[in-house]
Amino acid sequence: MNLKTFILKRSIQVVISFYVILSLLFFLLRLSPGDPYSKYIDSDMTQQEIELIKKQMGLDKHIFYQYLIYIRNLIKMDFGYSFHYGTHVWDVIKNKILNTILLFTTSVIVSALVGIFLGRIAAWRRNTSLDAGLTIASLVTHTIFLPWLGLLLIWIFGYKFELFPLSGIYTPEIWLDPECGFLRKALDVMHHMALPFLSLFLLHFGGYLLLMRNSMLGTLKEDYILTARAKGLREKDIINRHALPNAALPVVTSVGLSLAFSINGGALTETVFSWPGIGRELVMAVSHNDYPLAQAAFLLIAIVVLLANVLVDILYAFLDPRIRYE
Amino acid sequence: MSELGFEGKGPLREAWELFLESSIGKAGLIILSIFALMAIFSFVPPMIDPMYHPMKGVDPEITTSQPPSLRHWLGTDFMGRDILSQLLAGARVAFLVGITAALMSIILGTFLGMLAGYFGGVVDTLLMRTADVIMVLPTLLVILVLASLFKGLSIWSIVIIIALFRWPGVSRVIRAQTLSLKNRPFVEAAKALGASHLRIMMRHLLPNLVPLAFLYMTFRVTAAIVIEAALAFLGFGDPTTVSWGMMLQWVWKTGHMFKAPYWLLPPGICISLITLSFYMIGRAMEQVLDPRLRKDWEG
């Protein structure tokens, strides 16, 4: 199987998986108590609006026909009306996508890189106090309850020392001021991002560190490392050039596998820090009983996770040619 | 046993001794026993005085959150309920949620993994593709969407949903093990004797799979505890139970997080520590079962 077929096969799998997920959502909505359309109709709506929505969704038609309409609407990116905002769901969501990507990708990538780097050191200096310290630190930060960590960070760095803002993504005064240039605005966003980034980073780097450490210890026992030693290569070269690239492979896979875990964490972090992203939007939609918005946010997250997994697989296949011929 | 030529310890005993050699495993076990004690003692405070009831007991003399005192060792929450009794009750809920959800997901994962491995073909493809999809979905957000569909979830439905979304990891491992077991001579012998599929699976395969399945138990427990706590923290927990996540939600939502460290700290420390202890026990167990990891771990 070459890389192209591999990508094609995985992409078809993504389409099928996504189709199954959205179909399940459709039928779950019908299984849930009460009239399914009550979840699309707000008490504030006029009779006319209700009729319009009923017609749009084919309420008067057979369930199979409703299903077709549901699929058609999703393809058209028409997720219905958000009660809470009173606008189209897509208009609410599209402004939040970038914020989530900014916070999420930076924290996952930085924590994976730091995890690989420190894991290498821990394995290299194994059974020293440095190794023990790193291992214990990762165990503790990896299992700390994330929303609580967020609250602690806000309390200590935001409230007590007033180093960072308590919540949000930007300071309105700076963004409304026409005098402020791009750099000033970017610095403002980074200032707001520091604490949410720190909590996601602390949660994740420990997991990658422990994985990298174990993987590195396994790799150092391989025959080709022995060969490299026998050739008289410097220890530094053996670690960095021979062991590191191979040992880092499982970490790449684990970034994909732990994505679901990271996204849960992302939603919690966004909520605690009032970071205007998709995860927080989903949480708020659920508490406002805004089902159309919740559904759309969830589907968006689901497609991103599925695609990200394919990307990680492709990256892995690219890094490790053996995987393609499996 | 000595008649058969086996001297000394059984495999379980040996595994236990190996486990105790690991300081990570021992530390985890000690922390966990403290929580077990807390869960047991959670029945005591309401017996002393009804005002110590974690949910309904209100100190008649207190109307706002109070710092620790002799009467309330850890202080009270915003309506005058005792924080220590809530903390003890939270330990009970954490064990209940963690262990039942983990047990259920492991039973489900073992059976589905065994079916997939034993029958292969269409059954295998269907089950494993389903596992793939479930595995990449963020469980917490799935439960959130379900909560919005079904308008509030009881603690037991939360447990069941967690179990339904946590079996794929176990089932993959069990499937692989089943694949290697099903071609062994003892299974072929059973087949030759005319044993049914059901009998082969229940009598010959299952006993060989159960120990492996239990290795995955501890990590499932941590996942379940954390998901329940997060759900409660976000305000979608069962309103009739006092869990640690619920306590954090109360501190946060009543705006006490900057004012009442005596209330903010204990539940968070408890959730983090119980997760840590199960995690440490899990890692120590991995070490026992995977000899390659043994020597390197702690030297």
Image (cartoon, coloured by chain):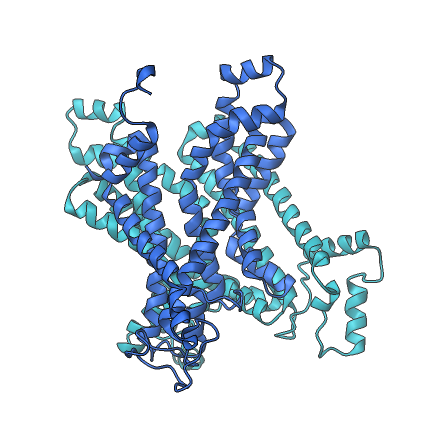
Chain colours: A cyan, B blue
Left or right for B162, reference A248? right
Quadrant occupied by the N terminus of chain B: top left
Left or right for A132, reference B276? left
Q: Is residue B144 visible?
A: yes
Q: Is residue A193 visible?
A: no
Q: Position of residue B170 (x, y in %)?
A: 48, 39
Q: How many marks?
A: 0
Q: Position of residue B210 (x, y in %)?
A: 47, 33
Q: Position of residue B94 (x, y in %)?
A: 43, 57
Instruction: Name which residue lies at 52% across and 63% down.
Output: A278
Quadrant occupied by the C terminus of chain B: top left
- Is B13 rendered above or below residue A102? above
Left or right for A161, reference A46? left
Residue A30 sits in which quadrant?
bottom right
Tell which of B56 and A157 is nearer to you.
B56
Tell which of B205 and A319 is nearer to you.
B205
Q: Position of residue A11 (x, y in %)?
A: 58, 40
Residue A73 sits in which quadrant?
bottom right
- Is A311 rendered above or below residue A149? above
Instruction: Name which residue lies at 54% across and 60% down.
Output: B155
